[in-house]
Image (cartoon, grey):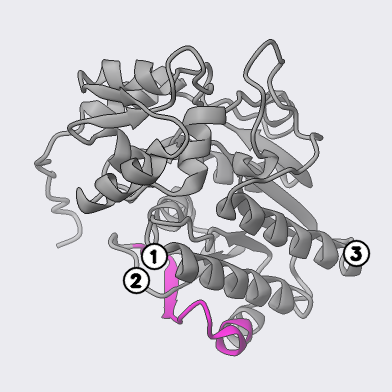
């Protein structure tokens, strides 16, 4: 199987590539503005800027993949500032679907999306948000995902023979990844939403993100699927688990909080504030049924792992490589 991974240099793309790296029948092509920080034996990597649509399109068409994994979605304040994140995401998405029109052997595209596409939700007395819920994004990242999914829908009208699988991830956290919400929650003092009016914060672990992509490729089915850990916590509960003091914040107070946290090296984008103040649980039933995927770690597990990261990790040397 030939798999092209757009965004292979990021934590998501690298982890997904490693899931397929031991399969002798799989060959991989990687594209990103930075190379992966792990050795991937079965991949040929091309360092191409996301905004170079023509070059990216050429490379993808020449490879003629059977599966394209589009992990080249740039979350604001993750690897890019909000402006660059939007430009890079739009360009990377355009190159994926432009190239896909000219790949005769292509049978599936699996794309990263986000539960931020649903926008704010009333946290009182509602059931988890299902996949078919309308899109009402209030944040820049949510609107970026609406645009990306719109490009996917336009492509599918022209190539109905290709299964387009959209994985809508809850906020992603994990060891050493540039997660804006993860950095924020590890600050010495954390602003949260007003007490008794906080949103339901639902997270997904980076390891489950990698596994969800692999499960989607195995299933080969089209559709949009919510991917999240079981359960929810409030922002103040999450901070208490990390034994951090918190400051209930609302209204104009968030302008001060955003400025202060940016100075401390953890700028928080508006979609993360939305998760803290207006977050809502999502239903993952369709992913369990159609992708045979259930996240292995709950939201509470993600929080505990977030605060248990060691500052220094000693890795064992793989002497078989020498």
Residue 210 visible here: no
Mark 2 Cα shell of 10 Å, populated few (<14), some (14-19), many (≥20)? some
Q: Give the range drawn in magenta.
A: 40-57
Mark 3 Cα shell of 10 Å, populated few (<14), some (14-19), many (≥20)? few
Question: Residue 217, position in %: x, y?
Answer: 64, 48
Q: How many labels does the image show?
A: 3
Earlier-in-chain disc, 3 versus 2: 2
Instruction: Tell me: 311 left or right of 54.
Output: left
Q: State which quadrant residue 108 falls in.
A: bottom right
The residue where tag 3 is placed is 157
Instruction: Tell me: 307 left or right of 313.
Output: right
Q: Which residue is drawn at 44% across and 68% down?
A: 43
The residue where tag 1 is placed is 9
Depth order, front residue of 269/160: 269
Earlier-in-chain disc, 2 versus 1: 1
Residue 35: mark in rendering: 2
Question: Residue 7, position in %: x, y?
Answer: 48, 65
Magenta includes 314?
no
Point out the image quarter for the C terminus.
Answer: bottom left
Magenta includes 43?
yes
Q: Residue at x 30, y 22 (%)?
A: 239
Q: Distance between the residues labelled 3 and 2?
A: 33 Å
Q: Residue at x 58, y 25 (%)?
A: 294
């Amino acid at each position: 199987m030939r798999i092209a991974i757009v965004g292979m240099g990021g934590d998501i793309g690298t982890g997904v590539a490693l899931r397929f790296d031991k399969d002798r029948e799989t060959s991989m092509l990687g594209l990103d503005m930075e190379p992966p920080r792990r050795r991937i034996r079965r991949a040929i990597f091309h360092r191409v800027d996301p905004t170079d649509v023509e070059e990216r399109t050429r490379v993808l068409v020449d490879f003629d993949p059977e599966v394209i994994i589009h992990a080249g979605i740039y979350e604001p304040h993750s690897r890019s500032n909000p402006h660059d994140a939007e430009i890079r995401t739009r360009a990377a998405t355009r190159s994926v679907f432009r190239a896909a029109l000219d790949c005769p052997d292509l049978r599936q595209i699996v794309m990263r999306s986000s539960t931020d596409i649903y926008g704010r939700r009333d946290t009182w007395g509602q059931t988890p948000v299902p996949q078919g819920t309308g899109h009402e994004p209030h944040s820049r990242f949510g609107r970026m995902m609406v645009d990306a999914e719109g490009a996917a829908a336009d492509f599918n009208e022209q190539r109905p023979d290709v299964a387009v699988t959209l994985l809508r991830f809850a906020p992603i956290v994990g060891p050493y990844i540039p997660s804006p919400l993860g950095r924020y929650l590890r600050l010495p003092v954390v602003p949260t939403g007003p007490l008794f009016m906080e949103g339901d914060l639902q997270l997904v672990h980076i390891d489950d993100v990698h596994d969800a992509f692999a499960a989607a490729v195995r299933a080969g089915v089209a559709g949009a699927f919510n991917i999240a850990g079981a359960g929810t916590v409030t922002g103040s509960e999450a901070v208490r688990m990390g034994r951090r003091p918190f400051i209930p914040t609302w209204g104009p107070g968030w302008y001060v909080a955003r400025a202060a946290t940016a100075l401390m090296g953890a700028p928080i984008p508006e979609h993360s504030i939305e998760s803290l103040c207006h977050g809502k649980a999502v239903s993952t039933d369709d992913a369990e049924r159609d992708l045979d995927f259930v996240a292995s770690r709950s939201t509470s597990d993600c929080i505990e792992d977030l605060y248990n990261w060691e500052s220094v990790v000693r890795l064992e040397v793989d002497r078989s490589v020498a």
